[in-house]
Image (tube, rainbow, N blue to C red):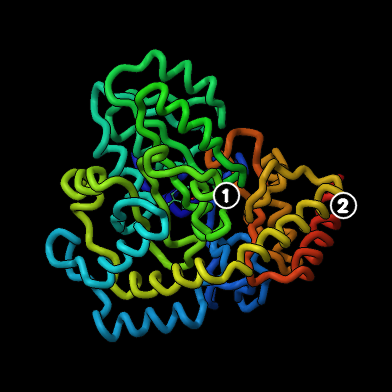
Amino acid sequence: MVNILDFMTPPFSQLAVGLDDIARQGLYRSRRVIASPQSINLDIDGRNVVNFCSNDYLGLANHSGVVNAFKAGVDRYGVGSGSAHLVCGHSAAHHALEEELAAFTGRDRALLFSTGYMANIGVISALLGRGDAVFEDRLNHASLLDGGLLSGARFKRYAHADVVDLGANLDKAQGNKLIVTDGVFSMDGDFAPMDELAVAAKNHNAWLMVDDAHGLGVIGEQGGGILEYFGLSQQDVPVLMGTLGKGLGTFGAFVAGPDLLIETLIQKARTYIYTTAMPAAVAEATRVSLKIAIEENWRRDKLKQLSERFRLGAEQLGLQVMPSASAIQPILIGDSQSAVDISNALLNAGFLVSAIRPPTVPQGSARLRVTFSALHQEQHVDRLLDALARIILGRK
Ligand SMILES: *Cc1c(COP(=O)(O)O)cnc(C)c1O
């Protein structure tokens, strides 16, 4: 199937065998080239399709106010930031955004990172080392798992959202302890039991870190995310990581928390110190998208309505929905190749829905990850349900 490397000699020729292997398991990954702005409609190969796989939940990635702020940012600061934050790349735009993110999350301070992946790796490695222990939900995002492994601390996974299993592991641990969890699980859409995790952390004298990539701007009355939803303070959850490329529609990430945490990260987080700052114009655009996310409650209300309409409709069709109260509404398929086949059939019918396969999700739990945007309308949901009924039920 894959033969571009056939001409090569060992050891590189082994790569072809590896790629063939991936393809045979229905796990081969490839990109689709998009020729339009991010929105609920995308132009793919000259065709217009309805997009149900973006994380641009609030519909801000191509919002005119956000776009104009980006352009004004470029006019004022140019494109490149020139260096890392600690050298000469930390602009007034970055600084203002950090202050606004701190106020928004109700934390002492916030610190920008260039991506969420880097934020997670930087934070965990700055807080822990050999002799310490990190505890991770087994469904945590890859960047959290990688961060834990890279830190050199003892690495323990606990059963998904299972505070009893976590407690048993905490009892046995030595050194500094950090509990790490997604807030809204990225491939399932369910919420971490943050209130119970906060109690477990206090009882065991452990730090607690939440990655709220999919909750920020989306969950909570004011869009404050999973911690607003649970009403948890900086004392309860001292380490909050959020991303800017999902609900807020731009790019980048931040960590918010106590002053001591932020100062420690500035001194020790290698993925903060040794990388170029995000363009200042991205920070300017994010300042505007944050304002819109806070003020425009209709976006969250709309998302809730659309997600519930889809969930109810999918249940009525007998599709296997998952326990999600968020804008991520997966349909469980099981077999990887079937998930890919269904995703391709949906694309032919004009709907872009991604098939999520192992190792992103556990073996045998391949799924269609359907996500909604505040810009979708009820008719989009109904048309997707019709297509799912035709394609999935038609296969049985
Ligand atoms: C997307 C995501 C990240 C990575 O953020 P980027 O800014 O895209 O690097 C981290 N954690 C979770 C839970 C995510 O969904």
Q: Callout 1: few (<14), some (14-19), or many (20+) C-alpha neighbours within 10 Å?
A: few
Q: Which mark is residue 1?
A: 1
Q: Quadrant of residue 73?
A: bottom left
Residue 155 horizontal side relative to residue 212, left or right = left
Residue type at the position of mark 2: Gly
Q: Nearest the camera: 232 or 341?
A: 232
Nearest to viewer (mark 1 / mark 2): 2
What residue is disc 2 on?
A: 394
Say which element carries label 2.
helix
- Given contact means CB atoms under 8 Å apart, are the residues at marks 1 and 2 in contact? no
Measured Cα–Cα span from mark 1 to mark 2? 28 Å
Earlier residue among tags 1 and 2 = 1
328 relative to 171 in the view: left or right: right
The spot of residue 241 in percent (x, y) is 39, 49
Q: Amino acid at mark 1?
A: Met
Disc 1 residue: CB within 8 Å of ligand 1:
no
Name the residue: 84% across, 55% down.
Answer: 389
Residue 308 versus residue 20: which sits nearer the camera?
Answer: 308
